[in-house]
Amino acid sequence: MTAPKALVAGNWKMNGLLASREEIKKLNFLVAQGGAGCDVLICPPATLISTLMGKGIDIGAQDCHMALSGAHTGDISAAMLKDLGCHYVIVGHSERRADHGETNDMVKAKASSAQGQGLTAIICVGETDGEREKGATLDVVTSQVTGSIPAEATAENTVIAYEPVWAIGTGKVPTTDDVAEVHGVIRSLLTDRFGPAGATVRIQYGGSVKASNAAELMSVPNVNGALVGGASLKAEDFYGIIKTYQD
Ligand code: 13P
């Protein structure tokens, strides 16, 4: 089975105003000029999704509620994201697990809701600094992967993003050996779960990815793209990461 096509996704988090449409225009221009040897996705804040649709770059979301509609003030459902034309939604980002107390069961229900609407769920996993120091990385990642993938998920509508919490926004990155080890474990969990099709599920690395370290990180076995925070906010920086798949 051939390696899956990489997915380089930008997670803008709670950043971006209407003026950020300019960055998407620039990014479209850069991708149109220079090409991309990978799939490219931007997940802006929900307020910008509809304003960025149809401009070339695939636009996804950062979260969805587990229910499709109802009395959930302030929340957004997978049905609403589908309605806007999204194909992807991030679920279980560590910032949501920490800030909103999201458990594996909640992440699983969100992924299930998204997949039920025909969206691909980008399910985030990753250990904290404390867990890493205790040597619990593989146990934490294993329980998050197995606990967050819905029963009815398929290899086609699932992406896993491995984001060590201590590497997010800190400029610290794991060694390539550490990334290879964790991604290898995730790959075997995916083949246990999906059979041979598990080899086609994309496993992104996220945490302080930038143009200067992307080539090294993206060349690690079982790394099929990146989930990028800070370096996705400026089109030139983000394209510097995308471009590693062209070289
Ligand atoms: P940074 O790239 O800013 O470290 O953020 C990573 C991340 O959390 C992407 O979801």
Image: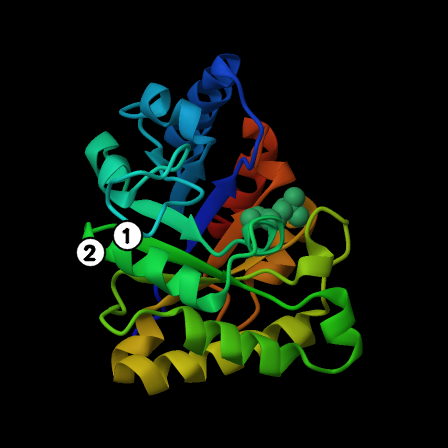
Q: Amino acid at mark 1?
A: Ala
Q: Position of residue 16 (x, y in %)?
A: 54, 23
Q: Residue at x 70, y 65 (%)?
A: 128
Label 1 Cα crowd, 10 Å radius (few <14 / some 14-19 / many 20+): many
Question: What x and y, as percent, mark residue 92?
Answer: 48, 56
Direction from residue 2 to residue 127 in the image, left or right: right
Residue type highlighted by circle 2: Gly
Quickly name the residue at label 1.
114
Q: Quadrant of residue 159?
A: bottom left
Relative to 67, say whether 198 is above or below. Answer: below
Q: 243 or 142: nearer the eye?
A: 142
Q: Which element type, helix, strand or loop, lies under badge 1?
A: helix
Query: Dot 2: within a 10 Å radius of its alpha carbon, few (fewer than 14), some, or many (20 or more) residues?
Result: some
Identified at 58% across, 30% down, the residue is: 233
Q: In the image as oriented, which residue stretches furthest toward the top?
A: 19
| Left or right, residue 157 beside residue 145 | left
**Where does the image place residue 149, in percent across and percent down from the top left?**
36, 70
Residue with the mark numbered 2: 116
Which picture quadrant has residue 54? top left
The label number, if any, that marks residue 76 in the structure image: none
Q: Is mark 1 within 8 Å of ligand 1?
A: no
Residue lying at 40% horizontally and 41% vertically, measured from the top left: 41
Give me the residue at 23% from left, 34% from top.
85
